[in-house]
Amino acid sequence: MPIVFTIARTEARRIFVSPLAWTVLAVLQSILGVVFLLLILDYAQNPRGPESSVGLSDYIGGGLYSFATLVLLLVMPLLTMRLFAEERKNGSLTLLLASPVSLIEIVLGKFLGLFAFIAATILLLAAMPLMLLVGSNLDLGRIAAGLLGLSLMMMALGAAGLYVSTLTREPTIAAVASFGLLLMLWLMQVLSSQPGWIGKLLGYLAMVGHFENLRRGIFSSVDIVYYLLFTILFLWLAVLQLDSERN
């Protein structure tokens, strides 16, 4: 396992020394900062009564995290496109595959390196609603559930993008293909309105529905297991793809 953390540390350093990562963080925070301010202004101008089921935490925290998923759908392919595609293009992937390190350790190390960026993004997103603690009472449980859902969704998006990056040597192609795959998974929520078992199946497979439950503070093990299985599936597919290349 130490080799996993060595690879993760190297990958995290490579991500954070890249101008792309800081640009993505800056753009992400700028866009979400504006959305956060707009939500506050709208809530202040249209206060909900005590009988309303939509509270401050749900309206501002939930609204912010719901919008963040759309932005992350666009930026995650940019972060995952280089994980393997660039190494293959530079020729360093051949050396990595020829080393005595197992493929599981390589994939986990890369994924944990990416998770360092995900953790930084989550911390910045958590700071915005928590600033409201100064003058209001927040439902911290609902905020925590939303952040958990956002973290799990980012892990799933990252795992899918990592897998696509193992399929090509061009980072740009990896980014476009990742976005196409994630968009199709996203659109399953729209298609879930179909009647019958097909609609139910698509509704269960869609990412958005599982996130919405957590965003509303509904903690269900089904949603947690869905994201974990999704992440493990694509990490395993990445291992299989690299195994075929090594052999």
Image (cartoon, rainbow, N blue to C red):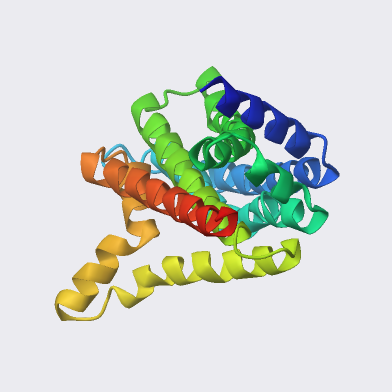
The quarter in which the C terminus is drawn is: bottom right
Of all residues shown, which one is farthest toward the left? Answer: 196
Residue located at (53% from left, 35% from top): 105
| Relative to 55, 81 lies left or right | right
Q: Is residue 186 above or below residue 211?
A: below
Residue located at (42% from left, 47% from top): 231
| Relative to 170, 241 lies left or right | left
Residue 16, image x and y in percent? Answer: 76, 34
- Residue 47 visible in the picture: no
Residue located at (27% from left, 66% from top): 203
- How many numbered marks, from 0 up? 0
Toward the viewer: 110 or 128? 110
Toward the viewer: 156 or 217? 156
Toward the viewer: 139 or 26? 26
Toward the viewer: 133 or 127? 127
Q: Is residue 196 above or below residue 166?
A: below
Residue 2, image x and y in percent? Answer: 56, 20
Of all residues shown, which one is farthest toward the bottom? Answer: 195
Q: Is residue 97 above or below residue 183?
A: above
Residue located at (46% from left, 72% from top): 184
Q: Is residue 80 above or below residue 187?
A: above
Residue 76, image x and y in percent? Answer: 62, 53
Residue 131, image x and y in percent? Answer: 58, 25
- Residue 172 visible in the picture: yes
| Relative to 16, 239 lies left or right | left
